[in-house]
Image (spheres, rainbow, N blue to C red):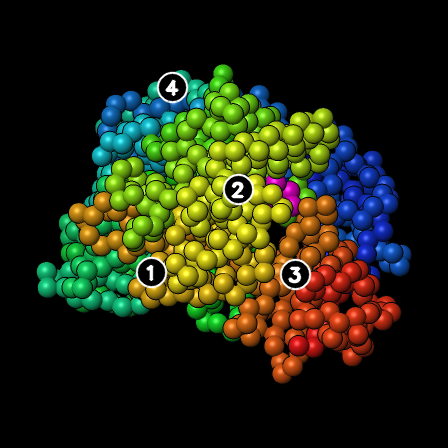
Amino acid sequence: MRVFCEYIENPIGIDSVKPRFSWRMEENEGKEQKSYRIIVSKGKDLSKEDAYMWDSGEVVSDQTANIVYDGKDLESVTSYYYQVTATDTKDRSKTSQVQEMVTGLIDKTLWQSAWLGIPGMGQEAPMCRTELRIDQDFQKAYAFVVTPNYYVLTINGERATDTVLNNANTDWNKTLPYLMMDVTDLVKKGDNTVGVHLGKGWIGLNMTVAKEDLPVFFLSMQMLLVNAQGEKTWFRPGIGVWEYTQKGPLVYDSIYHGETYDARKEIPHWNMPDHKEYDKKEIWARMTEAEPKKGEICAQLLEPIRVVDRFKPAAVYHLEDGSYTFDMGKNIAGWVRLKIAGTTGQTIEMSFAEEAFPDHSVNKLSIRDAKAIDTYILKGEGTEIYEPDFTFHGFRYVNVKGLTEEPAEDTITGCLVISDIKKTSTFQCSEELLNRLYEVASRTEETNRHSIPTDCPQRDERLGWTNDMSVRNECALYNYDLVKLYTKWMRDIRDTQGVVSGALSDTAPLRRYGPTPMDPIAITPANLPWNVYCFYGDKRILEENYDMNVRWLKYLERNSEDGVVFSSHMGDWAGPMCGTHAADGEGVGGGAVSTITPTILVATASVSYMYGLMAKIAEVVGKEKDADTFGKKAEEIRQSFLRHFYNKEEKYCGKNSQGANAIALYTEMIPEEDRAAVLENMVKDIVEKNDYHLTTGNLCSRYILEVLFQNGYKDVAYAILTQTTYPSWGFMLERGATTIWERWEEVNDPNSILANMASRNHPMYGAFSICFHKYLAGILVDEKHPAFRNVKIRPYIPENLDFVNASMDTISGVVKSCWKKEGNALIFDVEIPYNCKGEIALPVADPVTTEIRLRDVNIYKNGSSADSKEAQYLRTEKDRVVYAVTAGIYRFVVSR
């Protein structure tokens, strides 16, 4: 039995006054929960009831996700212990292990540390320190750092955590996250030295397109000691006690441009209590008081960024100029670890790129204005090891200059540096191209997570685009445990909202690119919280973002005429450039605006769809009146769409493009009686005019695949997915891609209009991966029973695919959907987790002639279902027979 508080086991830094508890069994014994009991105590010994903060008592309920704490008020920075007992319908109980929850700064007034800054405009990364004298005994020590910069915290010379690239990327004028760090093992009684190394981070790039970062550095830090009796002592080193130097080894750092580290300038023991024995006092100066940052200080309750993998290069090439190019074998986000012995002053320059020229020199076309160079200058004392602290790169190749001898096996090691988020899915099928696409799409998604979901990791951008995330977020939820990251990023979106207008911005946090207002094609503000609710049963994320969505929709209403918004600057972005297809070949975004699918058409359908989503959300959060209003508004805009964009006689939308028809069908704009005809027009364009190729951009490429699967064209969808000629995902793989490109085109020409959109790692086009689990495996969420309490299994089986094996590790447990063709039978293996139900829709060629067995028992024959203790017959559809099951493992055999 696993128990989670705010989705974390044994969490530190919970600052919610009403934290939520969830649990899951690791087996299906008992199958269904009858009741639960949650105990939260101040003492670890839960037999002592006088220490209880909350005893829920036995609650008759089958709920296991997001049970809200309802006890006494929790105190800040305090350890609480909790345990869950779940009883099943056979009156068998299981009790979890006792877990610890440490609260963060529930009381925000506890942040009383001074804000300090670095005077001057030096580019060098400042090393800051203060002394801390501890005379009392203590049991626990916690450190808190708030800064809009990147930082590394050390206590007595040791790093406080294994995390990197702290703090999380936010709008620091609105939100200032802290990472609560348990530093008990680093702090000692007596003299201590606290060191904070600051890098520019995102504040150095705020709202500027300058070639260099702004050298701005701010810091506020405090520490808490807790003794065995629970008494707390705060240490808040303030004005006059912090000192800094910019004479250290990190002489330059930039997220986009890289680092320059001069090991000759290292300062021994600078962050250790004995530093006075080594100090050159003239290089140290006092930090000065700074104006406090305006943002709200809050706990950083998302997975931190870490080095999650290290690996050797796949190949090494010696170039004519004496340099070496290391091919890491795959496109990643992160950096390399350099291990070298050499002479004093020897300079090693590491230049990163996604592509290489035929002579193996690096091709930097796709990184735009980012320099992406790390430079290390040796001190010349034995073996030296270097990894950056305040930059990261998107790359496959790294060219290394300055080596005086052939590199050893471990001279360069690749380091994958991303938000450390658990992968929750598996997928395998009989078509190897699809297996490769699943791997490549997954790598693209995970290498674009650095405390926000980014658009790319390599160039001078790396931002959170709401446009892209409209189609990415559901796909990603099928594959990764993203509830914490998405909750945080929704706050970033709220932070962009205009106080008066209610307008949102294209990127969150708003930085460098992405205008305000957000393009109305972006449905992220509503569909991301809705998808999180469906996957996790998280009602709070709907409530937190409700008012934001209402204000945004009111903005759109004011800026529309007859239900059509005034403007949409992106539309179905970056369609293919061939023939009369989607992109115009000039203008904004390197010709990324579609010429065949009007931006306003896409925006109008999207706004209607958002109103429909908000109607569902309003029902869930108990705002029935709003639900009715939103539903009527969705219908009004749908009718406006039909008036402005639908050709009733010819049965198509806009210019009869694939994208226009696909989004109209996906968002249910088309009258029911016309859907088949519009579908036929769309399919004719795909099959007859374009030989199973798409003419769609980043949004409609996903929508079109879903529409095809949902409406009986699974083999057309499969043909598109397995296409290998341009434009297609298979074409990218044929050209050596290990991550998904930004454009359908392979962009190599620096003089091309496409040169500014040449990213080789761009997850917006990875949204096709929705097909793997949602359609080929057929694992669906049930909106009426979120958190997979009722797992819908509805696989779509293409003619040319022989098997699929897929699984998802959900908040309720592991879901599996596997099928294979074997002779004249289809075999389905399904697993439904504890306390969940399943609805299994088995595909059949003909309901009358099909036979179905559950294990060895015949449960369906001659169009009628026999009694079964394990599976309850629900209904027969045109091409499916549907059964309800309880938790367990099942094998169905369907005759073909």
List the residue tagged with mark 3.
794
> Dividing the image into 4 quarters, which one contains the N terminus?
bottom right
Residue at the extreme bottom: 823
- Give the CA distance from mark 1 to mark 3: 31 Å
User: Which percent across, then down, holds residue 654?
Assistant: 44, 41
- Give the CA distance from mark 3 to mark 2: 33 Å
Task: Name which residue type carries label 2.
Answer: Lys
- Of badges 4 and 2, nearer the viewer stands 2
List the residue tagged with mark 2.
648
- Of badges 4 and 3, nearer the viewer stands 3
First along the sequence among labels 3 and 2: 2
- Compared across the picture, whether 851 is left or right of 636 comes to right
Q: In terms of depth relative to the viewer, which is nearer, 73 or 64?
A: 64
- Give the CA distance from mark 4 to mark 3: 59 Å
Task: Name which residue type carries label 4.
Answer: Ala
First along the sequence among labels 4 and 1: 4
- Compared across the picture, whether 442 is left or right of 852 comes to left
What segment carries the magenta color? Answer: 530-534
* Image-quadrant location for residue 880: bottom right
Q: Which mark is residue 726?
A: 1
